[in-house]
Image (spheres, rainbow, N blue to C red):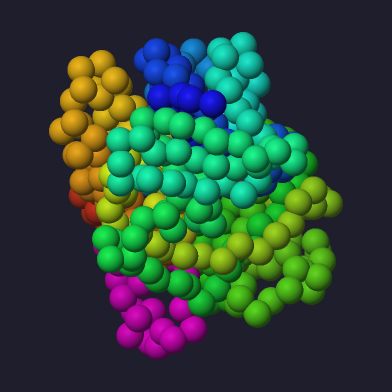
Amino acid sequence: MKTQVAIIGAGPAGLLLGHLLRAEGVDCVVLERQTGDYVLSRIRAGVLEGVTVGLMRRLGLDARLKAEGLVEEGFNLADGERLIRIDVAALTGRTVTVYGQTEVTKDLMDAAQERQLQVIYEAGDVALHDIESDAPFVTYSHQGNPQRLDARFIIGCDGFHGPSRKAIPASAVREYERVYPFGWLGILADVPPCNHELIYANHARGFALASMRSHTRSRYYVDVPLSERIEDWPDDRIWDELAIRLGPEAAAGMTRGPSIEKSIAPLRSYVFEPMRHGSLLLCGDSAHIVPPTGAKGLNLAASDVHYAVEALAGWFRHHDADAIAGYSAKALARVWKSERFSWSLTRLMHRFPEDGPFERAMQVAELDYIASSRAAQTSIAENYVGLPL
Ligand code: APR
Ligand code: PHB
């Protein structure tokens, strides 16, 4: 089989890229290791920046997002009894939208057939070949048969564990990594949220986040040591912990209910450079990971995709090689700023086991500063709504 662009991975990055390329008249095929149902079973964050919403709008795939997404004008930082509201709408003139990543993926998946975006699910043993040439290709197996897909470019949208990044020779790359000494234990429940806006809490017992998917579905997190096992966290224990960490006001508004999903996810900051090697471009989690504090993961994947589409459209329209050559630097400039924001919000809102009184005093001083300074709040707000492309 032959196409112009081979996309590996049908997560949000791969599907968004596929649709946008089709809209530009570029042929592409998406190869996904899992089934569609499996892809949709992954629960991830749910706060969309304007850039991400804008791409769904550009595709005309935002009907459900517009109808069901919750437009958020602010969010809160809690520190013990104190609640600092960041009025992002007043500070930036912009908002974010609460809409689950799973829903974004579903909307993109549902539209694939009608828009003739070819997605091959259950593609096994995907391997990249000749990425340093102008005629790269991908081999894979499908329904027991070996297959080959030739393309002008390959785009790795295959997440942190996929094969794309690993196809780049080690001598050409640089990796940056920070792992955190805790994970987020998340719970999803069909109960109304405790607050109409998100609350990120830094409590003596640890971090907590109150988030939501809708007016009737809540998503909460507490941080736990990586050694914790989910079996040791019955729902009641999580609700008790949330009530303490989120503070009395949120606790008073909290409705408890049975969990419909519960898991522990480790936190990591990771950047892989460069994001292009020869005819291979990387987008999303295949090239970088942010800790979930600030919900930048999907949004960063969306901005990578935006830059990749610009570069690929330029190449297929008028053989603009500079656009392809410039992709990595352009994408990485925004990646690093999001990495910085996610890392600094993680640092501010979590109790690190190695921290002593000095580090805690720094957190208190920073939260005091944020509470009293419009400039500090604006800085947080403009990162939260998403920096310009
Ligand atoms: N062959 C084909 N597909 C693969 C392979 C492989 N060998 N390995 C992984 N994939 C697929 C995965 O099954 C998954 O569907 O690539 C997809 C990658 O999707 P995500 O991990 O969701 O990554 P991405 O699309 O970059 O999304 C970025 O979404 O997943 C979140 O935390 C992530 O919020 C971030 C954003
Ligand atoms: C979520 O709703 O799952 C969520 C929200 C904000 C975050 C992370 C996760 O920072």
Q: Quadrant of residue 32?
A: top right
Residue occupying image coordinates x 36% and y 56%: 168
Task: Count numbered badges in the picture.
Answer: 0
Locate residue 20 relative to residue 169 in the image: left or right. right
Queried whether the magenta region covers residue 290, the answer comes back as no
Q: Between residue 256 and residue 60, name the one nearer to us.
A: 60
Locate residue 352 relative to residue 223 in the image: left or right. left
Q: Is residue 36 above or below residue 171?
A: above
Residue occupying image coordinates x 52% and y 48%: 127
Q: Position of residue 347 (x, y in %)?
A: 39, 68
Q: Main secondary structure of the magenta part?
A: helix
- Work out which quarter of the rendered image holds the N terminus and state it: top right
Q: Residue furthest left?
A: 322
**Range covered by the magenta-colored residues:** 348-371
Q: Between residue 351 and residue 243, name the one nearer to us.
A: 351
Queried whether the magenta region covers residue 356, the answer comes back as yes
Locate residue 69 relative to residue 285 in the image: left or right. right
Q: Is residue 137 above or below residue 310?
A: below
Q: Quadrant of residue 273?
A: bottom left
Residue occupying image coordinates x 60% and y 77%: 225
Q: Between residue 201 and residue 221, name the one nearer to us.
A: 221
Q: Position of residue 383 (x, y in %)?
A: 31, 46
Q: Between residue 178 and residue 138, name the one nearer to us.
A: 138
Q: Position of residue 336 (x, y in %)?
A: 28, 54
Locate residue 338 relative to residue 333 in the image: left or right. right
Query: Do we see residue 166 in this rendering?
Result: yes
Q: Position of residue 82 (x, y in %)?
A: 46, 61
Q: Is residue 175 above or below residue 27?
A: below
- Work out which quarter of the rendered image holds the C terminus and state it: top left
Query: Do we see residue 14 in this rendering?
Result: no
